[in-house]
Amino acid sequence: MRTLTISIIILVTISLSAKNIKDMAGRNVTIPDNIERILPYDSKTSILLFPVAQNIMMAKAIIPGSKKFKYISDEYNQMPEIDIKNIESVLINNPQVIIAGVFIDSDNFDRFNKLQNRTHIPVIMIDLSIAKLCDTYKFLSSILPHNKTCESCITYLNSIYKQSNNLIQENKSPDVGIYYTIGGSGLLTDPSGSKHSEVIDYLNLNNVAKISLPNGGHANVNMEQIIEWNPQYIFTADFKADKNAYTSIKTGSIWQNITAVKNKKIYKVPSKPFGWFDHPPTVNRIPGIIWLSHIFYKLPEDQMKEQIKTFYKLFYKYNLTDLEYNSLF
């Protein structure tokens, strides 16, 4: 009875002053004219919304593991958490809309439609694809009026997109193979085409793991495959509670004949507050584009540093010091 009562109140509130829009998935959604209370669907959405909607975000989505993240505003760390699967908790918070970050070209939308039907709260889908982030902030500016931060994010992202395109055109794509591994074994990867390896694909770099794409985007491989691929560069990342594979790859005898290991081209992907390649795959990947542009496309180091510090200030509301910047690597 309590849940039903809350749902009725929400329905009445929405109907008083509403408009029809198309979200980024092309769905017709009826939303309030003036949005003042939103919930993110998941952690991917929380991170993307934070710079432009922190004042109207009622909570951030749960990220397993750490409860306090480095190098992001205290406002984010102190924001309450919510599990969107807990319907009663969602209704008690009484959001006007739920915003869900998705990969328009690959995600199944059934769960979002079911959530909307069950709660009677409009669910708005936005695109998380790395090449569409600028469009996403433009869309958010249309439903979150008078938001100047959206304009700043759009300007910044446009500059990074333009820079990346120019660097790719001016410098021939390097003829090297890249292997990206997550977790402790070194044998879990994100293949080319995965939403978790978009940073590599976006810069027209050669992800050696050209294998079938499993659900979730992560694939188990074996050492024989890695020996056959023989990557010239290896990037390692944290994953859930697993230890980063950087040290075991660097020192493990089975890896010593891999070209990347012999030439000491092993990199630990920065992960504070969130991974620069993925985990979760959202706007936190932009520093990864800048970093790889420095490694593979001759982006000057001082320019990289300036752009990454600007990103942290704009998207994480955090002034990264030189010492903190250096610690990321």
Image (tube, grey):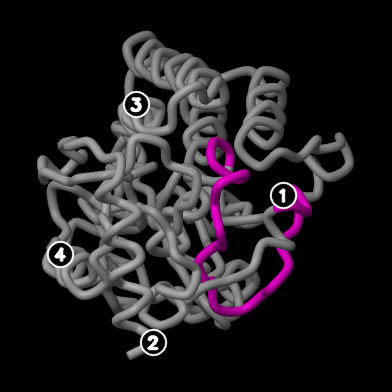
Judge the density around disc 2: few (<14), some (14-19), many (≥20) Cα neighbours within 10 Å.
Answer: few
Q: Amino acid at mark 3?
A: Ser
Q: Does the stretch in magenta take in 73?
A: yes
Query: Which numbered tag is attached to residue 142?
Result: 3
- Mark 3 surroundings within 10 Å by alpha-carbon count, few (fewer than 14), some (14 through 19), many (20 or more): few
- Place of residue 261 in the rendered image (x, y in percent of width and height, measured from the top left): 54, 59
What residue span does the magenta drawing correspond to?
Answer: 51-75
Q: Between marks 3 and 4, how big is the CA–CA gap? A: 22 Å
At a point 49% along the width and 28% down the height, the residue shown is 293
For the residues labelled 4 and 1, the Cα–Cα distance comes to 32 Å
The amino acid beneath tag 2 is Arg
Q: Residue at x 49, y 18 (%)?
A: 151
Would you name the residue on which mark 4 appears? 113
Determine the secondary structure under disc 2. Answer: helix
Q: List x then y, in percent, for residue 14.
A: 30, 51
- Neighbour class for label 4 at 10 Å: few (<14), some, many (≥20)? some
The earlier-in-sequence mark between 3 and 4 is: 4
Q: Which mark is residue 240?
A: none
Nearer-N-terminus badge (2/4) = 2
Is 144 on the left-hand or right-hand side of 70?
Answer: left
Mark 2 lies on residue: 2
Q: Residue furthest bottom?
A: 1
